[in-house]
Image (cartoon, rainbow, N blue to C red):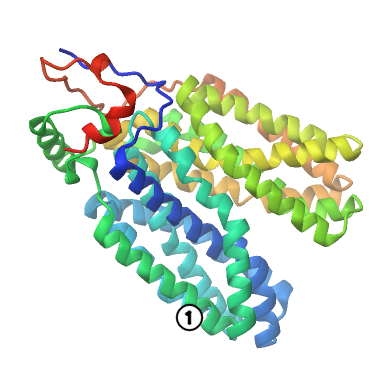
């Protein structure tokens, strides 16, 4: 009989191997967020003090270093398409580990830019490219829910990575302190070598933990391995849906970066002590862990497109609370809304690409859309600088973000999210009924 699939199944019945892939993806997100974003709060001041380089100059050079992640995402997506997710994740993780270690010994602006640039270039391989591709491969219909769990790693970086790197640098200096993190990354690469699988079929499991026969699993594995995507870079760049997704979700990413990066100085401006502001940001990060799952759950429940529209309106509310005259209630509510939203964009942007292009064509499309979103995301600091300088401060800057968010809503609202890539198509064995399989037994019964 024909399989009856439910795209709004909100059960996290991924199976033991599926849960392992979610955990590995989450670790990838944890490392990349720590070494390229959150860790800079500690690394740059320590490096400036240790080497005598000017902190503000180091901070300014961090932007062009981060821009290297844009060509990195394009080239590494091509590598991933040719060599597979596992090879890409392991190789880029090792390169990142070496560069991050050398980065800790930088004592000139040139060496800082070189090694920070390599870290940003290579680290997208095991995170934004590899981890997202892994989730799309293993969970083509439950990718939103799986990503909701995996992107908790991003939020935990603020709470766990920052104290770790602070301790290491304080006791061993930048060189040895950052090298200790590199050792952890190499160890993680070894774990990936033993445990990561490009597809569930490689270890006898099925996409979304569906109930299939061994013959069907073997057929799916051969089909996936031999598939050649018809979507070239040129063809993708000529598609309006690619630009609608890239611009809309890049805009939402920009708003997220703008709000998070300025949370502490904004709270200080409102009269809070620095330690209180940092504590509030840490609390927001933990709220974001819960938010990651909730946005993934909503994605699965009402579709990625509709969940993204809700997400955009959620941030519109948070921005309005930041713009209007503040009091304790509006501040606390806005901090909650910002924190809850942190974990959303990381899974919604890749989930909409998987929705539109499917499991087989995800990597090709993601390699084009990810750089578009990155270019727009990186513009957050320019928007902030303009608003703070010419529009009267944070209220003016956030007003620009509000307008940008409204544009994102319109684009997502008009987006046709019908899948245009190759889709899964298989049948259950004739003597099996999906409805007869208890949900709590599916986890074990599908790991063949």
Residue 312 image point, x, y percent: 63, 30
Q: Please, which residue is most extreme toward the top here?
A: 1
Looking at the image, residue 361 sits to the left or right of residue 226; the answer is right
Q: Measuring 11% from the left and 15% from the top, which residue is drawn there?
A: 431
Residue at x 50% of width, y 75% of height: 114
Q: Is residue 177 left or right of residue 355?
A: right
| Residue in front for this viewpoint, 274 or 319 | 274
Circle 1 residue: 102
Q: Is residue 302 above or below residue 190?
A: above
Q: Quadrant of the N terminus?
A: top left
Q: Kindly tell me whether residue 105 is visible in this rendering.
A: no
Picture quadrant of residue 109:
bottom right
Crowd class of label 1 (few under 14; some 14 to 19; many from 20; radius 10 Å)? many
Of 102 and 177, which appears nearest the observer? Answer: 177
Q: In this view of the protein, can residue 288 be seen by the observer? A: yes
Of residues 78 and 284, the one nearer the viewer is 284
Measured as percent of width and height from the top left, residue 347 is found at 49, 39
Q: Quadrant of residue 42?
A: bottom right
**Is 279 positioned to the left or the right of 123 in the image?**
right
12 over 90 or under it: above or below: above
Q: Position of residue 205 (x, y in %)?
A: 21, 38
């Amino acid at each position: 009989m024909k399989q009856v699939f439910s795209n709004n199944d909100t059960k996290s019945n991924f199976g033991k191997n599926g849960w392992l892939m979610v955990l590995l993806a989450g670790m990838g997100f944890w490392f990349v967020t720590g070494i390229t974003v959150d860790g800079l709060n500690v690394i740059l001041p320590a490096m400036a003090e240790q080497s005598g380089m000017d902190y503000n100059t180091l901070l300014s050079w961090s932007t062009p270093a981060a821009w290297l992640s844009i060509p990195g995402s394009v080239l590494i997506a091509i590598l991933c398409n040719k060599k597979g997710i596992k090879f890409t994740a392991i190789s880029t993780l090792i390169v990142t580990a070496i560069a991050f270690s050398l980065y800790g010994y930088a004592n000139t602006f040139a060496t800082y830019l070189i090694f920070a640039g390599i870290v940003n270039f290579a680290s997208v391989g095991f995170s934004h490219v590899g981890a997202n591709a892994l989730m799309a491969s293993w969970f083509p219909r439950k990718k939103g829910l799986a990503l909701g769990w995996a992107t908790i790693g991003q939020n935990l970086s603020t709470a766990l990575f920052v104290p770790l790197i602070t301790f290491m640098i304080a006791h061993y200096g930048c060189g040895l302190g950052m090298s200790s993190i590199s050792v952890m990354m190499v160890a993680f690469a070894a774990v990936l070598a033993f445990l990561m699988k490009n597809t569930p079929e490689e270890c006898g499991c099925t996409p979304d933990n569906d109930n299939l026969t061994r013959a069907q699993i073997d057929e799916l594995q051969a089909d996936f391995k031999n598939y050649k995507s018809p979507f070239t870079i040129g063809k993708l760049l000529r598609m309006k849906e690619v630009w609608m997704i890239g611009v809309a979700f890049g805009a939402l990413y920009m708003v997220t970066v703008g709000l998070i990066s300025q949370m502490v100085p904004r709270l200080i401006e409102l009269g809070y002590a620095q330690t209180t502001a940092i504590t509030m940001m840490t609390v927001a990060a933990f709220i974001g862990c819960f938010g990651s799952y909730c946005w993934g759950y909503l994605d699965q429940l009402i579709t990625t497109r509709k969940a993204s529209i809700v997400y955009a309106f959620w941030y519109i509310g948070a921005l309005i609370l930041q713009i209007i005259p503040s009091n304790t209630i509006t501040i606390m509510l806005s901090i909650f809304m910002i924190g809850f939203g942190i974990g959303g964009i990381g899974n919604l942007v890749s989930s909409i690409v998987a929705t539109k292009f499917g499991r087989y064509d995800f990597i090709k499309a993601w390699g084009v859309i990810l750089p578009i979103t990155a270019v727009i995301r990186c513009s957050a600091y320019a928007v902030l600088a303009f608003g703070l300088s010419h529009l009267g401060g944070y209220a003016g800057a956030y007003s620009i973000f509000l307008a940008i968010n409204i544009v994102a809503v319109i684009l997502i609202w008009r987006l046709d999210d019908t899948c245009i890539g190759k889709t899964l198509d298989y049948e259950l064995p004739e003597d099996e009924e999906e409805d007869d399989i208890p949900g709590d037994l599916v986890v074990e019964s599908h790991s063949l």
